[in-house]
Amino acid sequence: MQASSFGYVYLVGAGPGDPGLLTLKGKALLECADVVVYDALVSEPILAMINPQAEKINAGKRRGRHSLYQADITHLLIEKAKDAAIVVRLKGGDPFVFGRGGEEMSDLVAAGVPVEVVPGITSGIAAPAYAGIPLTHRDHSSSITFVTGHEAAGKYRPAVNWQAIAQASETIVIYMGIHNMVHIVSELQQAGLSAETPVALVRWGTRPEQDELIGTLGTILQQLEETGFSAPAIAVIGSVVNLHDTLAVCRPRVQDVRMAAPGID
């Protein structure tokens, strides 16, 4: 089948949850889509922007629970593109930042399906910002490392080199790390980070229910146990976390944004 036999697939980043952070292009695509295949972490206000006539398919993957497996999602996108003019693959955050967007795009290209990425604001930037934690600051940090924490020790090769990260970066932002914090904390301390190193966990970043747990490498595991603080959350490690107490009072308000839909080129 030639590429002209397919409709277009758009890999759209929904951002971290606040509907005001969705791009204008992403919103316009949702409003004219024929099919939307969406992830578990896409917020309800953003799902409400989808064309009412569109077919909506939940392909969400959460720890231990899968609506669809990755191979099934790619197959579904290809099949839907045979009949639909605009298929939106709606992904939380940014499709290319720990979102498997690169894998999906490669498979779609191999199948001859026209595909385009629409970037979104990733939670590793937005959640700390809404918590009053600037990832860089002239007095604290001139480097950032973004890393996945969704890796059990010894499960993957190559494994995350926590020692190199601890030594090379002044701010560490960890995605999907709550379930693996015991291993992460141990690795970072073995790499030389002090037990006094500040840690912030930001849950449901940019949403009305956002909350934070602030501690240190030496205290955060006990705090997690005592509070029951759970995923989904971003971890920020480094002295920039100390700015939270001062800057969190300026947290942006989450608003129900009503934007006029622009045209699609």
Image (spheres, helix red, strand yellow):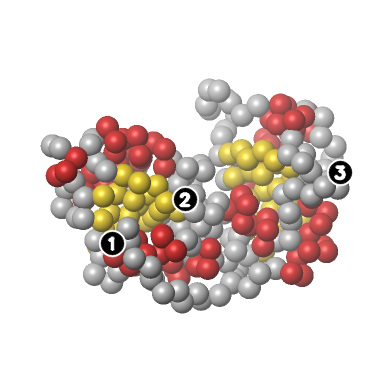
Which residue lies at the image location 61% right of the left edge and 60% below the top edge? 205
Which residue lies at the image location 29% right of the left edge and 39% below the top edge? 108
How far apart, in angstroms, are the residues tagged by discs 3 and 2? 36 Å
Q: Residues within 10 Å of mark 2 (few under 14, many from 20)?
A: many
> Quarter holding the C terminus?
bottom left
- Marked residue nearer the N-terminal end (3 or 2): 2
Q: Nearer the viewer, mark 3 or mark 1?
A: 1
In the image, is residue 138 above or below residue 57?
Answer: above
In this rendering, position of residue 59 left or right of residue 45:
left
- Marked residue nearer the N-terminal end (1 or 2): 1
Residue 119's disc is 2
Q: Which residue is mark 3?
A: 196
Secondary element at tag 2: loop
Residue 141: x, y in percent? 79, 43
> Quarter holding the N terminus?
top left
Which residue lies at the image location 57% right of the left edge and 45% below the top edge? 176
Q: Amino acid at mark 1?
A: Ala
In the image, is residue 237 above or below residue 54?
Answer: above
Q: Quadrant of residue 182?
A: top right
Please tell me which residue lies in front, 245 or 108: 108
Q: Amino acid at mark 3?
A: Glu
Q: Which residue is mark 1?
A: 33
Q: Residues within 10 Å of mark 1 (few under 14, many from 20)?
A: many
In the image, is residue 161 above or below residue 120?
Answer: above
Which residue lies at the image location 41% right of the left edge and 38% below the top edge? 102
Q: Quadrant of residue 165?
A: top right
Residue 231: x, y in percent? 58, 53
Q: Residues within 10 Å of mark 3 (few under 14, many from 20)?
A: few
- Marked residue nearer the N-terminal end (3 or 1): 1
Q: Amino acid at mark 2?
A: Pro
